[in-house]
Structure formats: C-alpha cells, structure tokens
Image (cartoon, grey):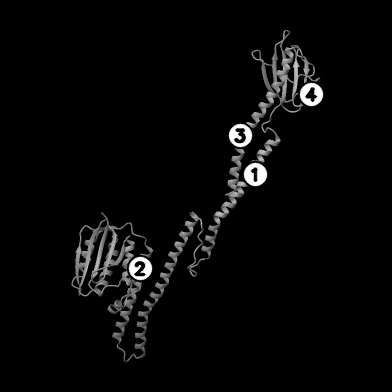
C-alpha cells in the first residue's frame, strides 16, 4: 500500500512538473526570442540612420549579422566577425520577419533560434540576422533535475508517511489477531483488546468480543449439558446393571420376570433420553425456518386434543379460527404435546388451551390449575435436564428435556416460548409470526 501510494503520488507530481516545465520552457523561449529581437531592432535603427558600424555590440550568447543586397556580411558581433552568413533563409515577399531553429551556426555552439528581418534600402533590401540559444524541451539540466528530484522525493515522503500510518492503523488488528490466535476452547474468558479510537477497527474488536461471549456461553452450556446428560444417562444404566447383578448373585431366589420388567423400564427411560437428545441436536443444527407449509393453528391444536380426550385431566379448548402460521406440522405438534404432558403432570383438574391472534402474531397458550412456577424458576425449567423438586416428585421418570425441546422448536419457527403470569397454575405462551 505504501509503495503504491508513493508511486501514484510520484507519477502525479511528475505530471504536474511536466506541465510546469512546459510553461517554464515557453517563458524562457519567449525571453530569448525577445532578447534577439531587441538586438535586431537596435541594429535596424542604426541602418536607417546610416550609422551602422562594422562591429556590432553583443554578448557571448547573442549573434548578429547584417547582410546587404548583394548577400555580403557588412556588420557582425565579435563572435560572428569574419564568418559566413549564419543562415540563408529570408522572409517571404509579403512579410518582413521570419524565424527558424538552426543547428549548426558558424561560431556559437549548439542549436540557435535565428530571427531575420527585412530592411528596405534604396539599393535593395538588407537582411538582419539575430540569433540566441534555442531552449531545449527540458529547459536546462538544472531545472529538469530539480523537478525530477522533487517529484521522487515527494513520492518517497508520501510512501514513508503512508507506511507509518498504515502500520499504526493495523497495529490494533495485529493485536486482535495475536489474541485470537492464543484463545482456545480450554482457555475461555479472554477477550481481544479494544482500541480507544471509535472507528471500524474498534467495531471489529467489539464484534469479536461479542462473538467470544457467545462462544463462552455455548461452551458453558455444552459443559453443563455434558455433565447433566452423563448423570441422567448413567442412572438407568446403573439401575439396570444393579438389578441384573443382584439377580445373578441369587439366581434361585430372584424373580426373573420382575427383573426383566425393571431392566426394560430402565432401557425405556434410556431410549427416551437418547431420542430427546437426538431431536435437540437436530434442532440446534437448524436455522430459523423460513419455508414450511401454512398451518391453521386452531385446526392443528384441535386435531391433537381429540386424541387426548378421556384423560384424567379435563382439557378446555378456546380456539380462534383463521390463525395461520408457516412451519413444520410435526414439530408444532411435538411442541404442543410436550406442553400438554407437562400440564397434565402439574394440573389439579383442568387444562386450558387457547389459540388467538394478536396483530401479526399467532399466540397459543397452555395453562393449568396447578401450583404454578415461581418467577425465579421460569427460565430454569427451559434448561436441559433441569427439573424442579415438585416435578421430580410427580414424575420421577421424566427426562427434563420436554420444555427445552419445546423452546427450541419455537425458536426454529422464529418464535418465542415463555411462562407468563396467571391467576393460578402455570401459563406457557407460544408466539410465532402469523401468516395473513
């Protein structure tokens, strides 16, 4: 970046100096031509008054010659004295002035700018030749060297300044990179340094730290989940192993049908936990569902409730028709089933299921008339394997994954599942976008 910036600035400076050099050359060339023209006018003045000397005054850079009507040189400056005519061209018959660049003039060295003037005389026209040095395209070695050196110097200064600026700007980025390189899954909690300047790099650092916060939270959930899952998976395996080992120690006294039933119960609990874990893993891997079919939520709930009629708890449906959502029918049925299973465990006599519309939101509520959930535990029940004391007493065989799975299904459908206040019992409220 620094090299490119320096090269671009140097090229721009060279372009500007080329324009400046062209302007200087024009002014210098005009000065030299005017110098030669003034010397020729003085010589013409002397001719017209018949006071022309044979030796004309002039400096080393100026050359003058006066040629009569016969073509003979009758007067000249000292540097052209005794030399042939410096040029043979002459003005046309319609003009009195002409100018050309002549390379080889007897006398002065180098290319010269020669002016010729026609002077009327009774015996015939005379010619006055006046020459001064022609200005080259680079004006002079000193001027061109100065401009070229200045352009290169400016480019180098800009390159060095750009290097330092970019280096200072990217120093925080390098610090962020070095910190991210050292952060590993076993050393969480570290964060990248945040620069003081409020610029894009600060936003990058803040975004990286926010990402690390989410990763740490995910790692913590993973550790807790692993710990809890290993405990809940170990329980049915340990129970089944204990029954089998005890029966094998006293085979004659064991009730083998009863041992088989106990082992099958523990295997069933183990299977239920594994099934729920696999379902949660699939839900974790999915992004919010933007496709899916359009579902009438009241129709779905009504159909599922028909299969639950006749249970120990009375279910009261309050369904508003025309509340449609987009999603997966099986997943939404699983969500409702999990909520109903939880309500049946905690309700005293009645469960109320409500479907209604709130603007652009479809709302489904499952409320029971049980003891309810204290506000401080309303988020705890959505954690995997988390079970309140009352829940363990009512259903010792539960997995603690039903409510977490229901919330994950709500999230996949771009919705939310929360526990809200109610006069009695627990009220679970699902909100998902409504299709109009």
Residue sitting at x 65%, y 29%: 27
Disc 2 or 1, which lies upstream in sequence?
1
| Residue at the far top in the pictured view | 122
Instruction: Locate the C terminus by quadrant.
Output: bottom left
Q: Is residue 114 visible?
A: no
Q: Measure how far apart labels 2 and 1 are at the Cα level.
A: 67 Å
Q: Is residue 77 left or right of residue 90?
A: right
Report the front residue among 12 and 61. 61
- State which quadrant residue 232 falls in: bottom left
> Whole-Å distance between the Cαs marked 3 and 1?
18 Å
Residue 98 seen from this side: yes
Could you tell me how far apart the alpha carbons at marks 2 and 4 are, in whole angstroms?
Answer: 107 Å
The numbered dot on residue 280 is 2
- Residues 9 and 321: in front is 9
Q: Quadrant location of residue 130?
A: top right
**Of callouts 2 and 3, which one flags the residue occurring earlier in the amino acid sequence?**
3
The residue carrying pointer 3 sits among few (fewer than 14), some (14 to 19) or many (20 or more) residues within 10 Å by Cα, namely few
* Marks 2, 1: nearer the viewer: 1
- Which dot, 2 or 3, sits closer to the camera? 3
Element carrying mark 3: helix
Of the pair 86 and 51, the residue shown nearer to us: 51
Numbered badge on residue 79: 4
For label 2, count other residues whose C-alpha is less than 10 Å away and answer few (under 14), some (14-19) or many (20+): many
Depicted 58 relative to depicted 298: above or below: above
Residue underneath mark 3: 19
Badge 1: few (under 14), some or many (20 or more) residues near its Cα, within 10 Å?
Answer: some
Mark sitting on residue 153: 1
The answer to which quarter of the image holds residue 431 is bottom left
Estimate the x, y position of residue 408 in percent, counting from the top left: 34, 65
Asked whether the residues under the numbered discs 4 and 3 touch, taking CB atoms below 8 Å apart as contact, a structural biologist would say no
Q: CA distance from mark 4 to mark 1?
A: 42 Å
């Amino acid at each position: 970046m620094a090299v490119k910036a320096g090269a671009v600035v140097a090229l721009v400076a060279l372009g500007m100096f080329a324009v400046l050099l062209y302007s200087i050359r024009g002014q210098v060339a005009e000065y030299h031509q005017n110098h030669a023209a003034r010397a020729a006018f003085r010589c013409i003045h002397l001719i017209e008054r018949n006071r022309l000397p044979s030796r004309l005054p002039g400096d080393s850079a100026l050359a003058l010659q006066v040629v009569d009507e016969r073509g003979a040189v009758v007067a000249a400056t000292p540097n052209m004295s005794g030399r042939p005519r410096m040029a043979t061209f002459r003005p046309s018959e319609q003009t009195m002035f002409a100018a050309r660049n002549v390379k080889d003039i007897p006398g002065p060295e180098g290319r010269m700018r020669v002016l010729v003037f026609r002077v009327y005389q009774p015996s015939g026209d005379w010619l006055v030749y006046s020459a001064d040095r022609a200005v080259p395209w680079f004006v002079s070695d000193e001027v061109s060297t100065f401009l070229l050196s200045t352009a290169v110097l400016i480019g180098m200064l800009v390159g060095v300044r750009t290097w330092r600026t970019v280096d200072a700007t990217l120093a925080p980025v390098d610090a962020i990179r070095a910190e991210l390189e050292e952060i590993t899954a076993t050393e969480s909690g570290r964060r990248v340094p945040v620069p003081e300047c409020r610029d894009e790099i600060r936003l990058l650092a803040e975004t990286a730290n926010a990402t690390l916060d989410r990763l740490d939270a995910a790692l913590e959930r993973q550790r807790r989940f692993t710990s809890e899952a290993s405990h809940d998976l170990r329980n049915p395996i340990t129970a089944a192993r204990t029954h089998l080992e005890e029966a094998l120690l006293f085979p004659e006294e064991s009730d083998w049908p009863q041992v088989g039933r106990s082992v099958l119960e523990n295997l069933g609990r183990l299977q239920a936990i594994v099934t729920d874990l696999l379902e949660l893993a699939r839900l974790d891997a999915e992004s919010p569902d933007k496709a899916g079919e359009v579902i009438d939520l009241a129709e779905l709930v009504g159909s599922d409730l028909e299969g639950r009629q006749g249970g120990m708890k009375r279910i009261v449906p309050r369904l508003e028709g025309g509340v449609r959502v987009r999603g997966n029918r099986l997943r939404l049925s699983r969500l409702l089933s999990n909520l109903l299973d939880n309500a049946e465990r905690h309700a005293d006599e009645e469960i109320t299921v409500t479907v209604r519309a709130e603007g652009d939101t479809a709302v489904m509520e499952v409320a029971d008339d049980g003891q309810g959930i204290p506000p401080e535990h309303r988020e705890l029940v959505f954690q995997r394997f988390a079970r309140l004391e009352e829940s363990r007493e009512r259903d010792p065989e539960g997995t603690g994954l039903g409510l977490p799975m229901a919330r994950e299904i709500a999230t996949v459908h771009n919705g939310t599942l929360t526990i809200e206040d109610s006069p009695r019992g627990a009220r679970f409220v699902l909100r998902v976008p409504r299709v109009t």
